Amino acid sequence: MSKLFACIISTEANRDRAALISTAQEFAYAIEVLNDGIVFDVSGLERLVGKPDKIAASILEQLQERGLQGSVAVADTKETVLLLARQNKG
């Protein structure tokens, strides 16, 4: 099984850090906190949630339910997921 990572980048990451961590914990136990967001391992969620775009949509839905904004990406490597999420800071 291949790895799959998710990333949330937020312009308000410092203010919303606890809420971002809590959101990531809904999807993963391995979480890496960054200055501008969070990266977490979502490997295996394909079986439960679906393809990467569905996983990203689920994460975005959780953010919106918590009143948070951010850019969400899901990809096979940490480097790719960081680049994708940072490309569209929202």
Image (cartoon, rainbow, N blue to C red):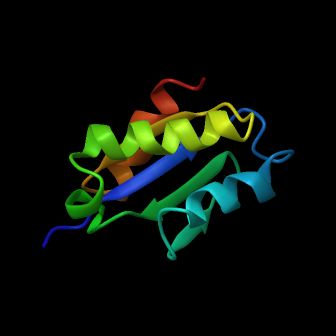
Residue pushed farthest left?
Answer: 1
On the rendered structure, is 40 left or right of 66? left
The answer to whether any part of residue 73 appears in the image is no
The answer to whether any part of residue 25 appears in the image is yes
* Along the viewing direction, whichever of 81 and 65 lies nearer the viewer: 65
Task: Tell me which residue sits at (69%, 52%) in the image.
Answer: 20
On the rendered structure, is 13 left or right of 82? right
Q: Quadrant of residue 8?
A: top right
Task: Tell me which residue sits at (68%, 61%) in the image.
Answer: 21
Expressed as whole percent of the image width and height from the top left, the position of residue 33 reads 64, 63
Expressed as whole percent of the image width and height from the top left, the position of residue 18 reads 79, 59
Q: Is residue 5 above or below residue 51?
A: below
Task: Tell me which residue sits at (12%, 73%) in the image.
Answer: 1
Residue pushed farthest right?
Answer: 15
Q: Is residue 10 above or below residue 35?
A: above
Task: Tell me which residue sits at (82%, 48%) in the image.
Answer: 14
Which quadrant is home to the C terminus?
Answer: top right
On the rendered structure, is 77 left or right of 25? left
Expressed as whole percent of the image width and height from the top left, the position of residue 85 reads 47, 36
| Total count of labels | 0
Expressed as whole percent of the image width and height from the top left, the position of residue 46 reads 23, 58
